[in-house]
Amino acid sequence: MTQRQFFAVCFFAGLLLLLYHLLIIFRPFFLPVLWAVILAHLTFPVHSRLTALVRAREAISAGLLTLAVMALGVLPVVALTFVLVREARLAYSALNTWIESGGLQRLPETLSALPFGAQLQELLGSFVVTQGNFEGFLLQAAKMMSGFLINELAGFAQNALLLAVDFLVMIMTLFFFFKDGRRLVQGLYDIIPLEEAHKARIVTRLDQMTRAVVKGMVVTAIVQGLLAGVAYTFLQVPFPVFLMALTTLLAPLPFGGTAVVWVPVTLYLYWVGPMWKAVAMLAWGIGVVTMVDNFLRPWLIGRGAQLPVLFLFFSILGGLAAYGMIGIFLGPILLGIFLTGIQIYREAYQYPAEPAPPATPSH
């Protein structure tokens, strides 16, 4: 090994060691920075137009757009929080009224009127044999559920500071991505050790995947939530705003999704009557809310992302398990980049284009 090679090996070993420790340092900020990357990428065209309006002063444009994003993120959450608190109080009052009116005593009779009510009563009975009477078992279960909810709320309060810090990190990062994004992207683009055509192809694919996946997930979830909310309001289901928000939040999940909300609502409507409301909710949930997910999301993601449906499904599910909610977006994006890399490898190395034959001189 020559002296030059030795110094090169030591240099890259030190560089990798430094990179490893930097990753450890920045790991707590990975998720908020990743959210900032996605938001900056989606809204950068707006930043470019706003920069032109303020005479190429990027800092002013970045500040205004960051404030706009912060307002759009904070104000709806604050408004929804007030609504949820109000509806939670109404729910607590309704539960007390139901208990005081003898709802626990009437519960076995009510359960028998539900589909598979007899089997449900038999199943519950097997649990309450050792607990005394049915009412005592339900009271104990309600007490346990109340304790669980209190613990969850306490955990949420404890994590509120962490959520606020993550949000502030995301907002601060978003501002600098707007302000210095072009230079950052160009610097990363220049150090990619690939041919210019391959780099351009990967960047183009990344842009297509990000826009297609985010558009498909977010738009579909909002549409499903609004459609379900219309049904909740029309059928006079208690707490329609909370249920609509919960439906929108759960809509991107590959398993259950919106059905986690509207199926229990259907059972509730069957329970309290009249019957036509339960039938209408069931038909609306299957025929409209679920069908929107089956048609709108593949249509929005499909042509832009160009991913096999099976791989798309597993990338969403695996991303959710590995990275949480942001994994729903990150999984398909990483899959799309990987498949693009496979295509580049096949074209450049496995099936390289044959050189053109030399031109024969004409006589």
Image: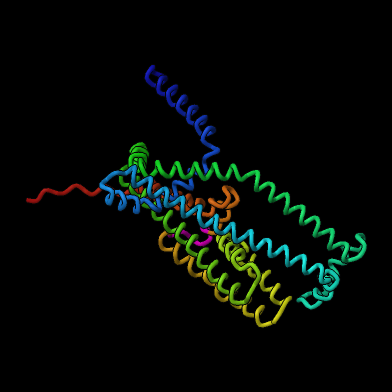
Can you name the residue that lies furthest to the left here? 363
Identity of the residue drawn at 61% across and 78% down = 283
Residue 309 is a magenta residue: yes
Residue 313 location in percent, x, y? 54, 59
Establish if 247 lies above or below 163.
Answer: below
Q: Position of residue 332 (x, y in %)?
A: 49, 54
Observer-nearest residue: 363 or 59? 59
Residue beneath the point at 40% across and 53% down: 42
Give the x, y percent position of residue 322: 58, 48
- Is 122 positioned to the left or the right of 315 in the image? right
Magenta run includes residue 8: no
In front: 303, or 286? 286
Q: Is residue 338 visible?
A: yes
User: Which percent across, then down, holds residue 167?
Assistant: 52, 45
Establish if 202 lies above or below 12. Answer: below
Q: Tell me the magenta residue range.
A: 306-312
Count of marks overlaid on the render: 0
Name the outermost residue toward the top: 3
Q: Residue at x 45, y 27 (%)?
A: 15
Q: Quadrant of residue 7?
A: top left
Q: From what the image shows, is residue 238 above or below residue 79? A: below
Q: Quadrant of the N terminus?
A: top left
